[in-house]
Structures are given as structure tokens and as C-alpha cells.
């Protein structure tokens, strides 16, 4: 490795340590080289850096030795705990409400467990969550569209984000890939951040639904602090959090 490349790698490492994540375009500007050169540097140091959706992160932050999120393998990972968490979350639903159900492999269990006769309006942006809901006669399904993102079986577009902002939500059920006391709540895909944030901003109640295997893990895309949720729902039950003088529990 040349001295110039060593200097770039050190500078890139320092920038990511300070910011947590760096866009490829920003990295190229910071280092004074082309985006292709940055990508070659990252590829040559795959044990240290990872490149996801135009963003550079520390490979260690992905967990599992830098392995990218895979929907199929995640569906099998901790499936029993995910289902138990969603069974607890089910008690937080009330007839006639409008709710947001996030993407991923956890909240599909909530969608499956919603009773056929429970009247709800459910807003979602992923096919795996929408699929069990479309067969429930009492559920009015609002599926936000856009460009299909196969990594999480979901969609993304500015139009659908704008639509979500105009919907009044009684509750938002949000998934996560990492929960960390200092670095907050995070996920693997950057396109999900806007949906999670807008749903939380527009909801009266906000629930984080994630099994305890996510604790002390960090994923590349940060979207909230744990204190921003009314409760964390895991396989152990509903851990209510005090917020603005209120305590929410099942």
C-alpha cells in the first residue's frame, strides 16, 4: 500500500469515527480524489469499511463480521422471540385506530397476528407486512409505493414519504436492527430512516418492537434515541418509558 493510500485510509477512518457514516461523495471531496478511488480503497480494506447504498460505515458496526443484512436469513433469526414481542405489541392495538407498521422481519409477525375482525387502518411500505394484512376483511390497508428495495422487501420514494406525513397516526410500531444506550436506535438500510422518523413524528404513540438480541448492537443508519419511544416491546413484554409526564403500558 502506498503512502498516499495509507493517508487516505487514516483520514477516512477518522472521519467515520467522528460522524458514524459518510456519503461516498463527501468522502471523495474530503480526500481530494475521485469516487472510484474511494471505492477501490474501501474494497481493499473490506475488513475495516463497508459500503451500503452510497454510504461508508465501519464494518464492525454491521455486526456479524461486516455481513450485510439479508432478509431471508433475518427471517429465521430469533423468530420465536420476534413473534413473542409482537404478541405483546398486539395488546397495544385498539379498534378503529390508524397505525403504522414498519418493514423488516419482526413486524410481519404483528401483521399475521392481527385478528380478522379487528377494525384498523394499517399504513405500511413493505410487501411482507402487507401480504398477511390484505386477507383480513376488517383491515383497511394503505401500502406506500415507490422504488422496490429488495434488501428489505420494501418501497421508497419522496411521494410516499410526503403521503405518510399527511396521515394522522394513532400509533407507530417501529422495528430496529440495533439498540444501543449511547448510539441510539439504528437500522441497516438508509432509505428506511425517513419512514421511521415521519411515522414517529405523526403518531400519538410510538412503540419500538425488537427482540433483545438487538440490544448493544449498532447498525449504520441511526434514526432515533430510545427515549423518543413510549415503550420498547420485546419478547419479555412492554417496557414502558416515561415521556412528557405520561407512562404508557399494555
Image (tube, helix red, strand yellow):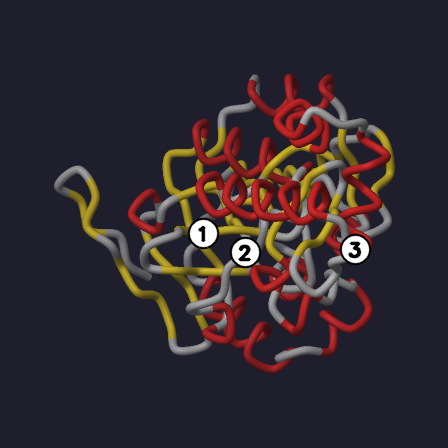
- Residue marked by disc 3: 128
Badges 3 and 2: C-beta atoms under 8 Å apart? no
Can you give x and y, in whole percent of width and height, for residue 58 in the image? 60, 55
Nearest to the observer: residue 116 or residue 203 = 203
Badges 1 and 2: C-beta atoms under 8 Å apart? yes
Quarter of the image where one finds residue 37: top right
Q: Nearer the viewer, mark 1 or mark 3?
A: 1
Quarter in which the C terminus is drawn:
bottom left
Compare marks 3 and 2 and give the one earlier in the sequence.
Answer: 3
Q: How far is the residue under mark 1 from the one under mark 2?
A: 7 Å
Q: Residue at x 55, y 79 (%)?
A: 81
Q: Secondary structure at mark 1?
A: strand
Residue at the farthest left position = 245
| Crowd around label 3: few <14 · some 14–19 · many ≥20 (10 Å) | some
Q: Nearer the viewer, mark 3 or mark 2?
A: 2
Nearest to the observer: residue 57 or residue 225 = 57
Q: Secondary structure at mark 2?
A: loop
Badges 1 and 3: C-beta atoms under 8 Å apart? no
Q: Compared to 126, does 65 lie above or below?
A: below
- Residue marked by disc 2: 176
Mark on residue 22? Answer: none
Q: Residue at x 32, y 59 (%)?
A: 181
- 93 on left or right of 221: left
- 196 on left or right of 227: right
Q: Residue at x 64, y 37 (%)?
A: 123
Q: Residue at x 51, y 59 (%)?
A: 218
Compare marks 1 and 3 and give the one earlier in the sequence.
Answer: 3
Quarter in which the N terminus is drawn:
bottom right
Q: How many marks?
A: 3
- Residue marked by disc 1: 185
Compare marks 1 and 2 and give the one earlier in the sequence.
Answer: 2
Amino acid at each position: 500500500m502506498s503512502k498516499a493510500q495509507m493517508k487516505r485510509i487514516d483520514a477516512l477512518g477518522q472521519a467515520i469515527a467522528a460522524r458514524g457514516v459518510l456519503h461516498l461523495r463527501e468522502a471523495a471531496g474530503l480526500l481530494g480524489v475521485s469516487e472510484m478511488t474511494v471505492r477501490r480503497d474501501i474494497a481493499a480494506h473490506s475488513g475495516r469499511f463497508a459500503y451500503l447504498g452510497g454510504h461508508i460505515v465501519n464494518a464492525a458496526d454491521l455486526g456479524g463480521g461486516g455481513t450485510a443484512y439479508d432478509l431471508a436469513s433475518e427471517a429465521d433469526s430469533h423468530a420465536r422471540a420476534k413473534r413473542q414481542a409482537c404478541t405483546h405489541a398486539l395488546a397495544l392495538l385498539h379498534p378503529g385506530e390508524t397505525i403504522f407498521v414498519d418493514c423488516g422481519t419482526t413486524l410481519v409477525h404483528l401483521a399475521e397476528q392481527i385478528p380478522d375482525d379487528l377494525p384498523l387502518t394499517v399504513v405500511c411500505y413493505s410487501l411482507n407486512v402487507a401480504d398477511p394484512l390484505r386477507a383480513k376483511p376488517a383491515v383497511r390497508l394503505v401500502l406506500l409505493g415507490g422504488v422496490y428495495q429488495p434488501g428489505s422487501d420494501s418501497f421508497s420514494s419522496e411521494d410516499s414519504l410526503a403521503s405518510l406525513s399527511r396521515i394522522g397516526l394513532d400509533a407507530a410500531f417501529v422495528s430496529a436492527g440495533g439498540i444501543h444506550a449511547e448510539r441510539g436506535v439504528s437500522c441497516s438500510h438508509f432509505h428506511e430512516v425517513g419512514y421511521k422518523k415521519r411515522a414517529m413524528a405523526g403518531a400519538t404513540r410510538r412503540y419500538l418492537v425488537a427482540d433483545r438480541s438487538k440490544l448493544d448492537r449498532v447498525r449504520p443508519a441511526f434514526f432515533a434515541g430510545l427515549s423518543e419511544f413510549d415503550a420498547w416491546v420485546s419478547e419479555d413484554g412492554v417496557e414502558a418509558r416515561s415521556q412528557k409526564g405520561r407512562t404508557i403500558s399494555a
